[in-house]
Amino acid sequence: MALGTNRYKLGLFVIVGTMLALAAVVVLGARRWNSKTVTYYAFFDESVQGLEVGSPVQFRGVTIGHVAGIDVAPDQRHVRVANELSVADTGRFKLGSSGDRADGFALQPKLRAQIAQTGITGVKFILLDFFEDAGPPEALSFKVPPNTIPSTPSTMK
């Protein structure tokens, strides 16, 4: 004798499975809700093709933020990249120095932003690192925000 399908159990299984999947997405995404970030800007005098909103910002290979926006600078020559950096990570790596900035985070003088590329895939990201031979930051022809990280040319230029 063939047993009929129990539609009640099948429906309950689908509903419970969907609820569990939704709960997993919320729990995994909730880690970012409480992370405090601060926005820093970098101005590049080169093409940023391949860099996208959401691309990682890394300090020596460790992700400490993401690209929040890409726009053309007021001089129509530079590209302004807004970077959201985790306050906890910037403090942990001591990227700041004591200063009287309103957000409590002052940049190290040798810290520079650079466009980097992963392997041969062409995916670009922002690399923050200390460049000992870094001269003074490039003087730009427009007013820059106080939370600006000076840039250095990429090795791809």
Image (spheres, grey):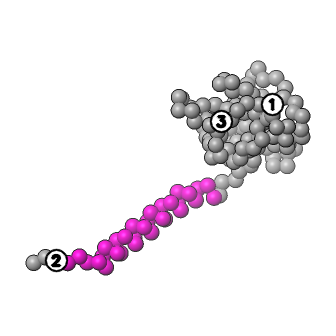
Q: Earlier in the sequence, mark 2 or mark 3?
A: 2
Q: Is residue 143 above or below residue 15?
A: above
Mark 3, residue position: 49
Give me the C-alpha separation between circle 1 and circle 3: 28 Å
Q: Earlier in the sequence, mark 2 or mark 1?
A: 2
Q: Is residue 65 above or below residue 115?
A: below
Look at the image and say whether residue 117 sits in the magenta stretch.
no
Q: Three-letter amino acid code at disc 1?
A: Pro
Secondary structure, mark 3, is loop
Where residue 36 appears, as percent x and y from the top left, is 70, 53
- The residue nearer to you, when weighing 73 against 102, is 73
Where residue 4 appears, as percent x and y from the top left, is 20, 78
Q: Would you say the magenta stretch is mainly helix, strand or loop?
A: helix
Q: Quadrant of residue 151?
A: top right
Q: Earlier in the sequence, mark 1 or mark 3?
A: 3
Where residue 84 appears, as percent x and y from the top left, is 70, 47
Answer whether labels 2 and 3 touch (C-beta < 8 Å).
Answer: no
Q: Is residue 46 left or right of residue 31?
A: right
Q: Which mark is residue 109?
A: 1
What residue span does the magenta drawing correspond to? 4-33
Answer whether labels 1 and 3 touch (C-beta < 8 Å).
Answer: no
Quadrant (top left, top right, bottom left, bottom right) of the C terminus: top right
Secondary structure, mark 2, is loop
Q: Quadrant of residue 94?
A: top right
Mark 3, residues whose alpha carbon is within 10 Å: few (<14), some, or many (≥20)?
A: few
Q: Three-letter amino acid code at disc 2?
A: Leu
Give me the C-alpha separation between circle 2 and circle 3: 61 Å
Q: Is residue 69 left or right of residue 22?
A: right
Give me the C-alpha separation between circle 2 and circle 1: 76 Å
